[in-house]
Image (cartoon, coloured by chain):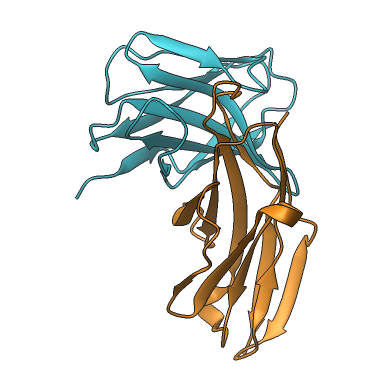
Amino acid sequence: DGGITQSPKYLFRKEGQNVTLSCEQNLNHDAMYWYRQDPGQGLRLIYYSQIVNDFQKGDIAEGYSVSREKKESFPLTVTSAQKNPTAFYLCASSTTENYNSPLHFGNGTRLTVT
Amino acid sequence: AQKVTQAQTEISVVEKEDVTLDCVYETRDTTYYLFWYKQPPSGELVFLIRRNSFDEQNEISGRYSWNFQKSTSSFNFTITASQVVDSAVYFCALSEAGVNRDDKIIFGKGTRLHILP
């Protein structure tokens, strides 16, 4: 079955450490996205990529980095510069490079930094 | 700039009651798309519906219906005869499609719906 796989489901890190969240899709989608979800805040866009080897900052990119070396993969690194990294992270993809196509989401990764 | 407001943070209704989730949006674009997503406790957002700005017809899908009114910039979602399985967080979202678009999908903060047995 086609879909988006995020791993791991739960991730624990010590403050000051970088951590990378995995996102893989086999839907052959061009566009991929990372969102952060905090209680009462909805979904906020971190980074998005419309094509391999290209990506753009979203609304809250500070303290995060991404890469898009393969169409199927869009890993997100939460760096030590991110002041409040504890959150639920959602990866998504869509079929076109504009924003009219529905997003397909993964199951998310819950990151806890202590 | 585009904005989506879901004023209802949390709603609780008894099973079999009807419930309406409100969504009000702001955009400078004349061409745009509106979406609703459902997020069950498992965490994955599930797409429910997409509506473009030129199609104001209401839509019904089983127990779900959507009322799009450009005059009030609203895209409300009604669940008829609610069931416990409808318990989830529901998100309304907006994407602009015109030449002045921001190239982003903006989500509301979500409405947490509790269906009580």
Q: Is residue A87 above or below residue A18?
A: below
List the single residue furthest toward the left. Answer: A1
**Relative vertical location of residue B59 with respect to residue A79 in this rendering, above or below:** below
Task: Give the colour of chain A.
Answer: cyan
Q: Which is more toward the observer, B42 or B24?
A: B24
Residue sitting at x 52%, y 63%: B57
How far across and how far down the image is residue A46, in percent? Answer: 59, 25
Q: How many marks?
A: 0
Instruction: Tell me the residue at 40%/40% (across/down).
Output: A101
| Quadrant into which the C terminus of chain A falls | top right
**Closer to us: A72 or B54:** B54
Dividing the picture into quadrants, the one containing residue A62 is: top right
Image-quadrant location for residue B68:
bottom right
Q: Position of residue B14 (x, y in %)?
A: 68, 88
**Chain B appears in which tint?**
orange
Task: Answer with left or right where residue A97 lies relative to residue B74.
Answer: left
**Residue B3, image x and y in percent?**
72, 38
The vertical placement of A52 against B43, above or below, is: above
Task: Identify the residue at image location x=44%, y=54%.
Answer: B47
Q: Residue at x 38, y 25 (%)?
A: A97
Task: Tell which of A101 and A91 is nearer to you.
Answer: A101
The percent position of residue B45, horizontal first and vertical second, equals: 49, 52
